[in-house]
Image (spheres, rainbow, N blue to C red):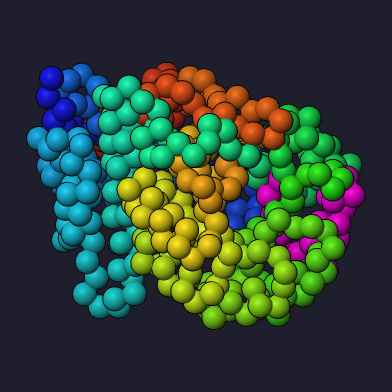
Amino acid sequence: MSTAIVEVNAIPLEKNLSKVFQGGTYKITSRYTLVTEIRLANGVVGQTYGGDEERYQSEIVEIINGPYRDILVGQDVFDVERDWESLFQYQPSTLINRGIHTLDLANKSIIMQAIAAVDIARWDAIGKTVNKPLYKMLGSYRDRVPVIAIGGYLEAEKGEKEFGDELLGYKKAQIAGVKMKVGHLTPAEDAERVRFARRTVGDDFIIACDANQAWSIEQAIEFARLVQKCNVRWFEEPMQWHDQLRGLAQIRAASDIPIVAGQGEISRFGCRDLALAGALDILNVDATIAGGITEWRRIAGMASTLNIGMAHHEEPQVAVHLLASVAHGLYVEIFNNPERDPLWFELPEAHPVIKDGYMTVPQGPGLGMPLREKTIDQYRASVPVAGRS
């Protein structure tokens, strides 16, 4: 039966959170995501969700359900590279700035997120067509991936006891470690939080630190030196946005802690520049915002030639397959707190097993994580979407 694409549809979701979560440079009050579906002539429906875009969600939806739908309908689902290039080269007239060209980067991020959504849904459809899990099609290096929780948020009501209980809760859930948020306090204050975390969880628990681009180069180096005896697995986005290439390289040279960046990059070209600048040890590019599975695999191939590890920013429903498919894949990240990521708990029909510090890769075809239609309807955002009433 034909594997032609007959329908493409993007559905924006929004769920208000019950509390505020604060990192080094931001506050989270709502969880956004985009469900994308690709239907084939053979009846297969590729379906995925990903991204956490607030400002440009409606623009991404409009591109997917407009020009991208027109480009993809009628194409064979297996013609991945040709269609990816067609989407990449398309220039929407509504997303071109005549004046300050750097503003176009925001427009390009819209395009790359739209490409990501349809690319991942497409790969899910391919897996369902051939009846294989995604990671098997991509290389199948392992069938389980170490898992860490994103946590350690600074909260007014969270004292040492509450923070300690949070950390021990991750251990009880058989999660291998924590990526804790730093950067909102001084380097010395956050270093003390890391020392407390290490004392609480012991030596056999992974602790990574994420500053979300909060500090200056000097502050980042100070923090790295203060925690050098805490066995920190990595230091993520340690410095402010404006001097990433040279600045990250300086921090990396001044510390033994591996440096992680890449979640803000939207293409293989930005990741290439970080890598060639000697700015990092690990890339954590996010497939759901940076061109999808197709682009992530290109970046992973480049990284392997430079002895750079591959992580993935959040989005475990996709990340677990990608990280399982390459030899240099590291940890899948989850929010183990339903208050922080209610959609991870409510949207998939079932979740991968977590045991002994590992997440088992789903064995169903494609992504292997069907989504609940009831949840999609419950949290659908008020953005006009063609194809669903």
User: Does 77 appear above or below 53?
Assistant: above
Residue farthest to the left, as pictured: 74
Magenta stretch prevailing secondary structure: helix
Q: Is residue 179 magenta?
A: yes
Q: Is residue 267 magenta?
A: no
Q: How many numbered discs?
A: 0
Residue depicted at 30% across the width and 61% down the height = 107
Residue depicted at 57% across the width and 29% down the height = 360
Q: Quarter of the image holding residue 133?
A: top left
The image position of residue 77, as x and y in percent, is 20, 35
Report whether 235 appears left or right of 202.
left
Task: Between residue 101 and residue 76, name the one nearer to us.
Answer: 76
Task: Between residue 356 and residue 337, name the one nearer to us.
Answer: 356
The image position of residue 377, as x and y in percent, is 39, 24
Give the magenta-colored segment's residue range.
178-200
The image position of residue 147, as x and y in percent, is 63, 39
User: Does 321 appear above or below 109?
Assistant: above
Residue depicted at 46% across the width and 41% down the height = 325
Where is the C terminus found, in terms of image quarters?
Answer: top left
Where is the N terminus found, in terms of image quarters?
Answer: top left
Q: Quarter of the image holding residue 192?
A: bottom right
Residue 217 makes an appearance in the image: yes
Report whether 373 appears left or right of 88.
right
